[in-house]
Amino acid sequence: MQTRTSKEFLQRAEAINRYFPHGTQLTDDDASLANWVQLREREDRLALLQVVKGHDAGGGAEAELKQEISKIEALLAIRYMLNFYEFMAVGIEKNDLDDHLLYDSLGTHVPSIYRRAEAYVRKVQSKDKDSLAFSALDPLVERWEKQCDKERAERAEKERRS
């Protein structure tokens, strides 16, 4: 579980939070961009534009391509996170990882990322009706959200009594 403290993981989390802050959700159009082909195609177009116009040419087309590249990088970061959390959910399901320990450290974060990326999750799942994509993560998110809601209600009740 050291992955979530790695430099790569933290950079991906930062990209997600910068482009898709808490409370935002991916659209169906966003979900279709979450692939390496889209990223490479835009990087190639940007490189060509910079060769033709010079590296410091600037301009609207270059700025637009850079923005699209940043967005696709954030989408790929979401895909990376979801895959990591699916791996973690399978570990919990198989009793190889401790559900309570992971809930205590990631109980709000995992559902937050999942809810932002639901359009992507549903797109992946709809490609194949027999798909097992995120089949362990779906119930984990539901369970952790219920647990979080229960804890919030208990805290509110405790504060109300004080």
Image (tube, rainbow, N blue to C red):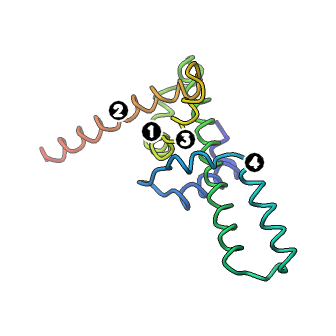
- Whether label 4 touches label 2, CB < 8 Å: no
Q: Secondary structure at mark 2?
A: helix
Give 68 or 117, whichever is nearer the viewer.
68
Q: Nearer the viewer, mark 4 or mark 2?
A: 4
Task: Give coordinates of residue 117: x percent, y percent.
Answer: 51, 44
For marks 1 and 4, the one nearer the N-term is: 4
> What kind of residue is marked 2?
Gln
Task: Give coordinates of residue 157: x percent, y percent.
Answer: 17, 41
Distance in Å between CA atoms under marks 3 and 1: 21 Å
Which residue does the numbered mark 4 point to in the structure image? 37
Q: Secondary structure at mark 4?
A: helix
Which residue does the numbered mark 2 point to in the structure image? 147
> On the picture, is 75 further left or further right than 112?
right
Q: Relative to 130, does residue 141 appear above or below in the rendering?
A: below
Q: Nearer the viewer, mark 1 or mark 4?
A: 4
> On the picture, is 23 further left or further right than 74?
left
For label 1, the crowd category at 10 Å Cα-Cα, with few meaning under 14, some 14 to 19 and many 20 or more, is many
> What kind of residue is marked 4?
Val
Distance in Å between CA atoms under marks 1 and 4: 33 Å
Which residue does the numbered mark 1 point to in the structure image? 107
Give 32 or 90, whichever is nearer the viewer.
32
Q: Secondary structure at mark 1?
A: loop
Tag of residue 120: 3
> On the picture, is 110 further left or further right than 81?
left
For marks 2 and 3, the one nearer the N-term is: 3
Q: Relative to 18, does residue 102 appear above or below in the rendering?
A: above
Task: Give coordinates of residue 123: x percent, y percent.
Answer: 55, 36
> What kind of residue is marked 3?
Tyr
